[in-house]
Image (cartoon, coloured by chain):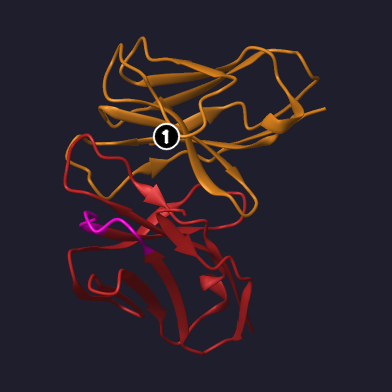
Chain colours: A red, B orange
Amino acid sequence: QKEVEQDPGPLSVPEGAIVSLNCTYSNSAFQYFMWYRQYSRKGPELLMYTYSSGNKEDGRFTAQVDKSSKYISLFIRDSQPSDSATYLCAMSVYSSASKIIFGSGTRLSIRP
Amino acid sequence: NAGVTQTPKFRVLKTGQSMTLLCAQDMNHEYMYWYRQDPGMGLRLIHYSVGEGTTAKGEVPDGYNVSRLKKQNFLLGLESAAPSQTSVYFCASRLTSGYYEQYFGPGTRLTVT
């Protein structure tokens, strides 16, 4: 079983829709929960991160962490064609020696 | 500030040939990583380094070697390329305290025929 599981999609929604992306994980030691965005033929870039449980909002993006269920989500409101990309969830523990564990990514397409 | 750069951007090798991929960062980061990304497999860690002169194996190290002679550079070598090493290779770096943020390069697309 992988430490981090993510539905690969692809997911296609019309412009303006609310998008929900999700990941599950098995390691209860994870404390940092991140979402990276990767445009086609580019390297991933950090979009948002959350420490421990709870919600975090940044503009049209909201990240949620439910540690009791080992489940994290990213919501995109008023989705735009420019949001079309692959979204990778990622997790790590609070340690300088830790490695970031990435999900396999969900490919998202926003139709104009 | 160029961030993380990778050389070359594209390469085609024949089976058995060797090559070296170069990663350079100008952010004074201690930690550097080499990943490969394949469809449906996500990012898989090949090797990493926690400082100049140090290297360690990741999840899929077989067939690859690395060196970190200078803090700003991290080299990935393929001694005898195989078609299974066809992939997109990403280098990343982070601060020692960067528990959640890695900075990625633009990637190298390698095809082994």
The reply to whether the magenta stretch includes residue A89 is no
Residue A88 appears in the rendering: no
Residue at 52 percent across and 32 percent down: it is B60
Q: Residues within 10 Å of mark 1 (few under 14, many from 20)?
A: many
Q: Is residue A71 left or right of residue B37?
A: left
Residue at 41 percent across and 85 percent down: it is A77
- Image spot of residue B67 (x, y percent): 43, 13
Provide the chain ID for the residue under circle 1.
Answer: B
Number of numbered markers: 1
- Image spot of residue A30 (x, y percent): 24, 55
Q: Is residue B32 above or below residue A82?
A: above
Q: Is residue A40 above or below residue B69?
A: below
- Image spot of residue A50 (x, y percent): 23, 64
- Image spot of residue B65 (x, y percent): 51, 16
Q: Is residue B81 above or below residue A9?
A: above
Helix, strand or loop at label 1? It is strand
Q: Which residues are magenta?
A: A25-32
Residue at 22 percent across and 49 percent down: it is A93
Q: Which quarter of the image is occupied by the C terminus of chain A?
A: bottom right
Residue at 34 percent across and 71 percent down: it is A72
Residue that lies at the very extreme toward the front in this rendered image: A1
Q: Pick whichever, A85 or B40, lies toward us.
A: B40
Q: Which residue is mark 1?
A: B4
Query: Dominant secondary structure of the magenta stretch?
Result: loop
* Residue type pointed to by label 1: Val
Q: Quadrant of residue B52?
A: top left
